[in-house]
Image: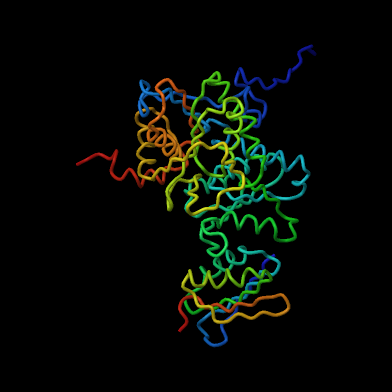
């Protein structure tokens, strides 16, 4: 017996949270990452502070946006054909690139600073990436504290450039474009144009430059704040420009001020965010929220949006160290 | 492709001598690969490293100083640099 029944292919519908391919989950203004109000760590009675939870993106971080645009750029320019991707990363860009490269039929080799937590290295290897752990001081003469970046470039240039193509997130304007076209418009829409302050950490500076440009074009008085760690920090994803080069992507004209945050404050606030807000964020989020607390001239009615780049799940080995005996039964 | 060969050191039957050919690789790739090999060696073992990137003339001596290894000799000829390195402080 035959029937006239036809199986209809379901199509992606982000309103229903139904996706036919993991890549359709990548954020944009029609499918934004959520922003969530802080009520206790930064008292709700004081400011309207929202964290943009980038760890709810499909590959777990803010860098999903960057990786998608970097890869799309390579494909559009015909540079990926038959080659593997090489990128220097503290882990998040590499994780998203490894996932997306696999889907595109390629593979990622990543040079990763040797202080990056083991969790990220294992995730990368699970995704099929080749992981080159690199001391930041690999090249003390030419590239102090930027060893992973230098090694990625040398891999891309070696073997006549035939094996690897570099995505160069520290110099590639597609990185800025990702945030200009997605993160910035999302924040503007989600705050209904009321955002007054934007906070993000200095890393590749793609987020600060892209979001900063977008928001300044809407309202030049919006304050763009870069958060910088202290030299010798242990805050993956962030860069201290006292020890690392300033990326070529940074557009200083859109940055209004820089707040320097120490590791102890960053990790203390990270723990507060877990316990007081039930937000299981990574340590760079603690640094960014700590910078808000250090800003003294915010008006009470101002709307603040800060980037929570990733969750804490990839940093449990770091947290184990700061917790000590905290949470263990006392005799 | 990097070529690695291992043999007993000529001057010490107990020590190893490793050849690492990093021709065609740009710095800091030779530094990285040399450090990987040196990490596998014991004090007194030697590494003969061949490079073609002139940047190695600065990077390799800096690496050996930083690691506490001994740069025994450097030779330059026909666009190649040959470094003889002993792991640890030379006896």
Tell whether A154 sits left or right of A296: right
Describe residue A39's horizontal placement relative to residue B85 as left or right: left
Q: Is residue A125 shown to the viewer in this render?
A: no
x%, y% of residue A288?
Answer: 44, 36
The image quarter containing residue A64 is: top right
Residue at figure coordinates x 43%, y 22% from the top left: A48
Q: Residue furthest bottom?
A: B11
Picture layout, residue A25 above or below residue A81: above
| Residue B33 at least partly seen | yes
User: Residue at the location (66% across, 44% down)?
Assistant: A172
Q: Estimate the x, y position of residue B68 in percent, counting from the top left.
A: 46, 73
Q: Nearer the viewer, residue A133 or A87?
A: A87
Q: How many marks?
A: 0
Please name whichever residue, A134 or A244, is drawn nearer the observer in this view of the structure.
A244
Where is residue B28? Give x, y as percent. Answer: 60, 63
Q: Residue at x 65, y 59 (%)?
A: A154
Which quadrant is home to the N terminus of chain A?
A: top right
């Amino acid at each position: 017996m035959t029937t006239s029944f036809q199986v209809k292919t379901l199509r992606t519908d982000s309103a229903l949270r139904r996706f036919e391919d993991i890549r359709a989950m990548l954020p944009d203004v029609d499918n934004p990452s959520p922003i969530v109000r802080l009520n206790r760590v930064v008292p709700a009675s004081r400011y309207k502070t929202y964290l943009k939870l980038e760890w709810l993106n499909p590959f777990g971080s803010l860098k999903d946006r960057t990786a998608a645009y970097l890869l799309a750029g390579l494909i559009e320019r015909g540079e990926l054909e038959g080659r593997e991707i090489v990128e220097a990363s503290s882990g998040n860009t590499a994780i998203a690139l490894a996932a997306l490269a696999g889907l595109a039929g390629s593979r990622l080799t990543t040079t990763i600073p040797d202080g990056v937590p083991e969790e990220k290295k294992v995730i990368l290897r699970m995704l099929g990436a080749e992981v080159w752990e690199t001391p930041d001081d690999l090249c003390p003469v030419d590239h102090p504290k930027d060893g992973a970046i230098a090694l990625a470039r040398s891999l891309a240039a070696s073997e006549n450039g035939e094996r690897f193509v570099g995505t160069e997130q520290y110099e590639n304007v597609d990185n800025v474009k990702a945030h200009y076209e997605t993160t910035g418009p999302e924040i503007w829409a989600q705050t209904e144009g009321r955002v007054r302050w934007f906070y993000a950490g200095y890393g590749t500076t793609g987020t600060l430059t892209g979001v900063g440009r977008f928001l300044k074009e809407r309202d030049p008085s919006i304050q763009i704040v870069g958060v910088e760690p202290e030299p010798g920090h242990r805050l993956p994803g962030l860069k201290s420009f006292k020890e690392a080069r300033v990326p070529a992507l940074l557009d200083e004209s859109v940055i209004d001020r820089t707040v320097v945050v120490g590791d102890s404050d960053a990790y203390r606030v990270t723990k507060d965010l877990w316990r007081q807000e039930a937000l299981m964020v990574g340590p760079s989020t603690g640094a960014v929220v700590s910078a808000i607390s250090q800003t003294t001239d915010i008006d009470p009615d101002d709307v603040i949006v800060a980037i929570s780049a990733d969750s804490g799940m990839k940093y449990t080995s770091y947290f184990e160290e700061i917790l000590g005996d905290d949470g263990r039964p006392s005799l | 492709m990097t070529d690695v060969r291992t043999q007993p050191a000529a001057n010490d039957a107990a020590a190893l001598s490793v050849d690492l050919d990093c021709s065609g690789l740009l710095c800091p790739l030779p530094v990285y690969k040399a450090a990987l090999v040196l990490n596998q060696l014991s004090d007194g073992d030697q590494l003969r490293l061949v490079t073609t990137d002139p940047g190695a003339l600065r990077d390799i001596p800096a690496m050996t100083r930083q690691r506490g290894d001994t740069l025994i000799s450097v030779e330059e000829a026909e666009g190649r640099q040959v470094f003889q390195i002993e792991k640890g402080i030379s006896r």
